[in-house]
């Protein structure tokens, strides 16, 4: 199993043994509520990269993975109008539409090909909150749907999970995908702390074990 790094729709490329890897979420809507001009300015991508987890933050057994090139296969979603409504990027596994972002992925030797990914995004708090809320609502509104690319069909399932009481806002979900007779479960949890969004995804146990570490590193820099 190769864990998808943030896009229920990018799972297609991963489950089909593609060398590509994309982000979990489709692009957010272009508009967001206004925000107080005195709020902290969004962090740069370079600043976010310094806040990502690294080997010194993790227990033994984690190995950092090289960043994979993005996949560009045409993807079709069947049976989830809410995802389709978000636009074409929802069907291509495009990353969140924020220019300020950073990402890292690890594999864990103690698990069976287990991976965990962390992504950081920064923007106004209003835009982060509105965009992530819309995306999670769309995904959990479709408990079952299909993702199709070429002759490959993946059966997807999404269930809302209990998010930990961390940061300013929290979202969490479990994704189940089946292809070629194999079934896998991926967990994603997103936490907004100020003007930074922390998203951790991968094997459920690894997400639970590393979410607070990821969040603490971001908050320590405030």
Image: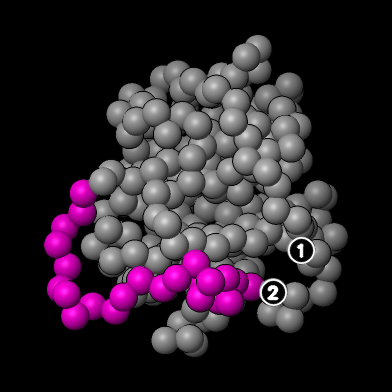
Residues at discs 2 and 1 in contact (Cβ within 8 Å): yes
**What's drawn in magenta, residue-wise?**
31-53
Residue 176 seen in render: no
Tell me if mark 2 has few (under 14), some (14-19) or many (20+) residues whose alpha carbon lies within 10 angstroms of its own: some
Q: Which mark is residue 54?
A: 2
Q: In which quadrant is the C terminus drawn?
A: bottom left
Question: In x, y percent, where is residue 57?
Answer: 69, 79
Residue 113 seen in render: yes
Question: In x, y percent, where is residue 20?
Answer: 68, 38
Question: In x, y percent, where is residue 40?
Answer: 29, 79
Give above or below for 13 relative to 25: above
Question: Which residue is depicted at the point 50% across and 31% down?
Answer: 92
- Asked if residue 212 lies left or right of residue 134, the reply is right
Secondary structure of the residue carrying numbered label 1: strand
Measure the C-alpha gap from mark 2 to mark 1: 8 Å
Q: How is the image coloured?
A: one colour
């Amino acid at each position: 199993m190769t864990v998808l790094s943030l896009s229920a729709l990018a799972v297609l490329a991963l489950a089909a043994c593609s060398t590509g890897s994309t982000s979990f979420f489709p692009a957010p809507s272009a508009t967001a509520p206004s925000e107080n001009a005195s709020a902290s300015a969004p962090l740069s991508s370079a600043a976010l990269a310094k806040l990502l987890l690294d080997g010194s933050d993790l227990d033994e057994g984690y190995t950092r993975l090289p960043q994979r090139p993005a996949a560009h296969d045409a993807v079709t979603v069947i049976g989830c109008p809410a995802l389709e409504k978000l636009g074409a990027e929802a069907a291509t596994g495009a990353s969140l539409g924020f220019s300020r972002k950073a990402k890292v992925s690890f594999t864990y030797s103690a698990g069976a090909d287990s991976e965990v990914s962390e992504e950081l995004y920064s923007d106004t708090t209003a835009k982060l909150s509105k965009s992530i809320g819309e995306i999670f609502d769309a995904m959990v509104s479709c408990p079952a749907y299909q993702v199709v690319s070429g002759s490959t069909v993946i059966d997807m399932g999404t269930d809302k999970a209990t998010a930990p009481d961390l940061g300013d806002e929290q979202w969490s979900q479990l994704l189940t995908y089946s292809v070629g007779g194999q079934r896998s479960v991926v967990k994603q949890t997103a936490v907004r702390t100020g003007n930074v969004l922390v998203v951790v995804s991968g094997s459920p146990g690894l997400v639970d074990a590393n979410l607070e570490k990821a969040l603490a590193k971001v908050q320590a820099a405030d």
